Amino acid sequence: RILAPSYLYSTENNINIGTAYLHVLYHKYLSKVKDPQSRIYCAIAAYNTGATNVARAFIKKKNFNQAVKRINKMTSDEVYKTLVKRQPFRKTLRYVKKVSKKMEKYL
């Protein structure tokens, strides 16, 4: 269902929808990524740009099912470095760096 902008401008609603989206990304769309830390990095990037654009950082194609094969052969550090160096959108590179760094404060 499409949500009205006025619904999303409510802080509580926005947080609820954002956390629900992260949950769906992590537990459904990215569930084939075996390493939990790698999956977190991919979820952060996908939250900002979509899973198909995350795939482009790894295989230069918009196919996450193919990209996951490469991701699962990498360490979580290699996944992070790929996301912040090869992501096709600069906005997403900065977002992954910023959120990953800030996450340490909250966990």
Image (tube, helix red, strand yellow):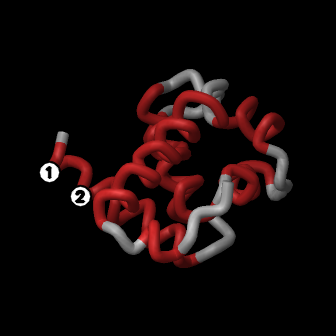
> Can you tell which quarter of the image residue 65 is in?
top right
Residue sitting at x 57%, y 40%: 25
Up-down: is 20 above or below 27?
Answer: below
Where the N terminus falls, by quadrant?
A: bottom right
The residue to which callout 2 is attached is 102
Residue 39 image point, x, y percent? 51, 35
Most foreground residue, 103 or 88? 103
Q: Residue 13 appears in which quarter of the rendering?
A: bottom left
Residue drawn at point x = 51 percent, y = 62 percent? 84
Q: Residue at x 17, y 47 (%)?
A: 106
Q: Looking at the image, do the residues carrying marks 1 and 2 touch, with CB atoms under 8 Å apart?
A: yes
Label 1 sits on a secondary structure element that is helix
8 sits left or right of 47 in the view: left
Please say if 3 is above or below 28. below
Q: Residues within 10 Å of mark 2 (few under 14, many from 20)?
A: few
- The reply, left or right, for residue 55 in relation to residue 82 is right
Which x, y percent locates residue 11? 30, 66
- Relative to 9, residue 29 above or below: above
10 Å crowding of disc 1: few (<14), some (14-19), many (20+): few
Q: Which residue is mark 1?
A: 105
Three-letter amino acid code at the position of disc 1: Lys
Give the x, y percent position of residue 29: 66, 36
Secondary element type, mark 2: helix
Task: Using residue 24 as the reference point, say whether residue 58 is left or right of it.
Answer: right
Eyeballing the image, is 105 above or below 96?
A: above
Label 1, label 2: how far apart the Cα atoms are: 6 Å
